[in-house]
Image (cartoon, grey):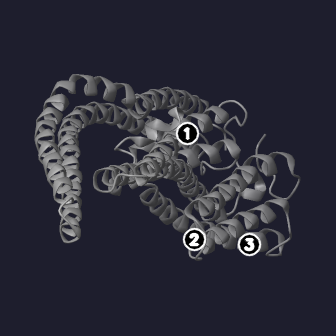
Amino acid sequence: MDVNITLASWSNLLLYSALAVYALSFLFYAFDLFGRQRVTAADAAREQGKKTAGAGTAGAAGRAANAAGAQSRTTGRKRSVVGSGATAVAEKTAEKASVSHQATGAGKSGGGAAGKSGAAGESDAAVTGGRRKLAALGTNMFVIGLLLHIASIVTRCLSVMRVPWGNMMEYLMVATAIAGIVYLVVMKWRDVRYLGTFVSGAIMMGLGLCITVFYTPAAQLVPALQSYWIYIHVPIAILSTALLSISAALAVFQMLKAFVETRHAAVESAKKKAAKAEARAQKVAAAEGGESAPVASSQAKRAQRESASVKGVPGWLRWLDKDRIPSSKSIEQVSYRIAAVGFITWTFTLIAGAIWAEVAWGRYWGWDSKEIWTFVVWVVYAAYLHSRATRGWSANKVAVLNLVGFLCIVFNFTIVNTYFNGLHSYSGL
């Protein structure tokens, strides 16, 4: 059957158009994800007056309570002179005064925190509105690009009147389109727009390879692929690739977010330790005095130095602190569920490929390079699912296996198809 040159040309034009629209989507998503820090700083400056007012009100109450606490401590010291019986009472009085002092200090900080929280809430609401507009624009552009992408696949299919996955270019075109559909479907249940920058960027990279390195003119299928199994085996493989690609992208986010959470936990722990040491030093100075006070003060200063030495989140990862990015645990759950479905479909891909091999070559398994690496991918993802259910494996270690499996898929598609000789040499290059 001849090739319809007009439809093939339209397919290429639609592919270029989809690439351009994906680029716009990428830019909107990127500004949404990475540009928020600057907007937050501007909003925080505008809300500084409200924060100061809230903190000032709480500070006045704190100072009044501190004066009362100081008076109680003075009374406690006077009573300590009376005698041994009165000394015990004085110690209790001083302890109560110290506790009262700490409580009022907490009230002060709590009031300040409440003021900050209120102001931060208003600021975050303003930022969220801006972010939602950019995210909505990015998603709209992504949907338009995906429609053009699908139209390019359909017109290429119609130009040769066959399935559009007969070579590496067509396989990658369909796989990236399915990845985009998976992304939009997942968005129905979870807000994963923070992933949009990387999904649109990866699709752009894939389409760029389609029109450069992997470009193949529209043509009929080679005789070895003219079988009804091409309607079964290859689409499931494409779906598996798309699912596992999204899961791998989420795994990267999970590991980065976990690193940020660990740094935050270390900083907060050091601050709490320093605060406890300072409170103890004040308590000792107020109630006991003598030689114990310098020791407690020295311990408090050492705790403060240790707190200051704890490293926080690096600047290039501060965009992960934003409220639109969920916790690493939540990201890991979504990544795992998608990978579990992808593993099931990859298992079917392996089985269907063995059956097709028996129909085409008279054997189910021949240790062909493509067969070996398809099995390697299956083993790695089986290890990933098993390790997640095994006690003692951290979430980051499990995510590493997810990424190793995805790298095996990339190696299987690019290197094995291109440079390894075998019965599965249908790249079209």
Q: According to the image, label 2 marks what residue?
A: 388
- SS at badge 3: helix
Q: Residue at x 70, y 66 (%)?
A: 380
Foreground of the two, 114 or 166: 114
What type is the residue that disc 1 sits on? Ile
Q: According to the image, label 1 marks what residue?
A: 203
Q: Is residue 45 left or right of residue 352?
A: left
Task: Tell me where residue 365 sits by quadrant.
Answer: bottom right
Across and down, in percent, residue 333 comes to 46, 63
Residue 354 circle label: 3
Q: Residue at x 39, y 43 (%)?
A: 193
Across and down, in percent, residue 224 comes to 77, 58
- SS at badge 2: helix
What type is the residue that disc 2 sits on? Arg
Q: Residues within 10 Å of mark 2 (few under 14, many from 20)?
A: some
- CA separation in Å, label 3 and label 2: 28 Å
Choose the circle earlier in sequence order: 3 or 2: 3
Residue 415 circle label: none
> Nearer the observer, disc 3 or disc 2?
2
Q: How many marks?
A: 3
Q: Residues within 10 Å of mark 1 (few under 14, many from 20)?
A: many
Choose the circle earlier in sequence order: 3 or 1: 1
Choose the circle earlier in sequence order: 2 or 1: 1
- SS at badge 1: helix
Foreground of the two, 78 or 157: 78
Foreground of the two, 91 or 65: 91
> Nearer the observer, disc 2 or disc 1?
2
What type is the residue that disc 3 sits on? Ala
- CA separation in Å, label 3 and label 1: 30 Å
Residue 305 shows in this picture? yes
Q: Is residue 365 left or right of residue 387?
A: right
